[in-house]
Amino acid sequence: MKVAVVEDSGLAREGLVSMLGAYPDLELICSADHTDTALEVLKARPADVLFLDIHMPGSSGFELLASLSYSPLIIFTTAYSEYSIRSFDFNTVDYLLKPISQQRLDQAIAKLRRQFALSTTSPQLDIESSHKEELQPALEPGSRLFIKDNDKCYLIELASIRYFESCKNEARAFFDGNKAFIKRTMNELELRLPATLFFRANRQYIVNLQAVKSIEESASDGFSLMMIDGMKIDISRRRATQMAEMLRL
């Protein structure tokens, strides 16, 4: 695997590079202290995986990712314990809190090897298979998400997304007065979203349970979900009963 380390702290960068030398299947192609420097190298020689700091002078790690024309596997590294970064549009393998211990790095590399092997040997896996679920880590209710939609990038709380709408082979997330396209199908999103927070109302929508204002009977043989932003989403009687049971818990 071709590896790049992007870290503005010289001590942290040199320490991580030294630790990565213990893994013979990792080939270091870039060790950069700034995103601009890294971008020049990564455009000329794509990396399979980035060990990427989040907060750096000038451009952030997220801005570097938004500038790439491909999606490498990502292991985020940061000194900020309040962040738990996940991503829909990039392949997040793990999140390491600095200073990084050898034991914690071993765990991340083990995940990386599994994910890299699956992505290279089985590129056409069905998204509902258990292997596909392994390829993308499950999201946690408290996750912060990085979403790239064309030239706009968002870093948001997962819980702030009110609902997802199916748009052919993509989905659209609605949050904080904004909406953004995500290059994922609804089935793939359903696999990754925490069931304690999100519910598949119908083929078209996945809703945030915390954003449901009320469940009302509709004119047809079913119900409508009234969302906190005024949106009305149809739901069958059976699914409405299942949701009501979850909300009572």
Image: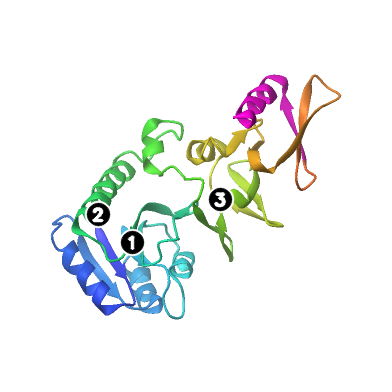
Span shown in magenta? 232-249
Q: Which residue is mark 3?
A: 158
What is the three-letter code of the residue carrying label 2?
A: Arg
Apparent side of residue 116 relative to residue 237 in the rendered image (left or right) = left
Quadrant location of the N terminus in the rendered image = bottom left
Q: CA distance from mark 2 to mark 1?
A: 9 Å
Neighbour tally class for label 2: few under 14, some 14-19, many 20 plus, Cα within 10 Å:
few
Q: Which residue is mark 2?
A: 104
Residue 208 shows up from this direction: no
Residue 141 placement (x, y as % from top left): 51, 45
Residue 150 placement (x, y as % from top left): 58, 61
The mark nearer the N terminus, 2 or 1, is 1
Q: Quick check: is 102 in the magenta stretch?
A: no
Residue 104 placement (x, y as % from top left): 25, 54
Identify the residue shown where x is 55% and y is 40%: 185
Q: CA distance from mark 3 to mark 1?
A: 20 Å
What is the three-letter code of the residue carrying label 1?
A: Leu
Apparent side of residue 79 relative to residue 235 in the rendered image (left or right) = left
Apparent side of residue 196 relative to residue 8 in the rendered image (left or right) = right
